[in-house]
Amino acid sequence: MAHGRTTARPACALDRGAFALSLATLAVAVVLLAAADWGTRLAGDSVIPGGPLDELAHLLTALIVFWALSSRARERFLVPALIASVAIDVDHIPDRLGVDWLTVGTPRPYTHSLLMIVVVVAAAVTWRRRREVLLGVALGLGIHFFRDMGEGGSGVSLLWPFSYHSFQYPHGVYLAAMAVFVLVDVAVCAPRWRQWALSRARWRPRAPQSESV
Ligand SMILES: [Zn+2]
């Protein structure tokens, strides 16, 4: 009977593929997010390289937040949430082309508001076949606005059209919140990693013991 040496990577839960959580992928995501976040601040309001760097930071923010949630939540909502967390910024294109009808009186387009999330959730309530996709989109939008409010400088008019007030908070608050999510991710992964390491140590061939004289 073959004893079951655990050689599988200590990826958490049922996640597989490029978005699987492990201490290695988490480390890569944190380094990339730090670099993208820093680069975004250096690039300022530029389209290139500011735009791609900011979208990378949005994607990684959503991924790190989702890693802290249950595997069931990731299975149901992760993919649409990741797509929505980046795709929402296409609403900046008219403004970049000089058409400001989506941004009159607000720092970001009107679709950057809670009304957008309400519309998507309402669609999820009425369209049962696409409910999980739409709820994932709503979560992705919420995570996107969470980062936008912490980018500094402009903020998000969350309550449009009822108010044009721009909500924002210091960038350090965003970084502190992300640090908490990273710690939760580590806590989720650590027991699996410890189990994997113990298993490897248990099955490592032992050196022959010298005979006592
Ligand atoms: Zn945005």
Image: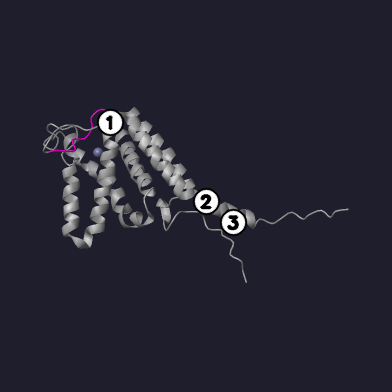
Q: Give the range drawn in magenta.
A: 150-160
Marked residue nearer the N-terminal end (2 or 1): 1
The amino acid type of the residue labelled 1 equals Tyr
Residue at 19% over, 51% down: 120
Cα separation between marks 3 and 2: 10 Å
Q: Are marks 2 and 1 in contact (CB under 8 Å)?
A: no
152 in the magenta segment: yes
Q: Indicate which disc residue 109 carries.
A: none
Residue 79 drawn above or below residue 2: above
Label 1 crowd bin: few (<14), some (14–19), many (20+), radius 10 Å? some
Q: What element carries label 2?
A: helix
Residue 5 coordinates in the image, percent (x, y): 59, 61
The amino acid type of the residue labelled 3 equals Ser
Q: Name the residue under label 3.
A: 199
Q: Indicate which disc residue 193 carries.
A: 2
Q: Is the magenta stretch mostly helix, strand or loop?
A: loop
Q: Are marks 3 and 2 in contact (CB under 8 Å)?
A: no
Quadrant of the image containing the N terminus: bottom right
The amino acid type of the residue labelled 2 equals Trp
Q: Mark 1 points at which residue?
A: 169
Residue 53 coordinates in the image, percent (x, y): 34, 37
**Looking at the image, can residue 25 be seen?**
no
Residue at 36% over, 50% down: 69
Cα separation between marks 3 and 1: 45 Å
Please say which color scheme the image uses: one colour
Residue 59 coordinates in the image, percent (x, y): 33, 44
Residue at 39% over, 42% down: 181
Residue projecting furthest to the right: 213
Label 2 crowd bin: few (<14), some (14–19), many (20+), radius 10 Å? some
**Looking at the image, can residue 18 be seen?**
yes
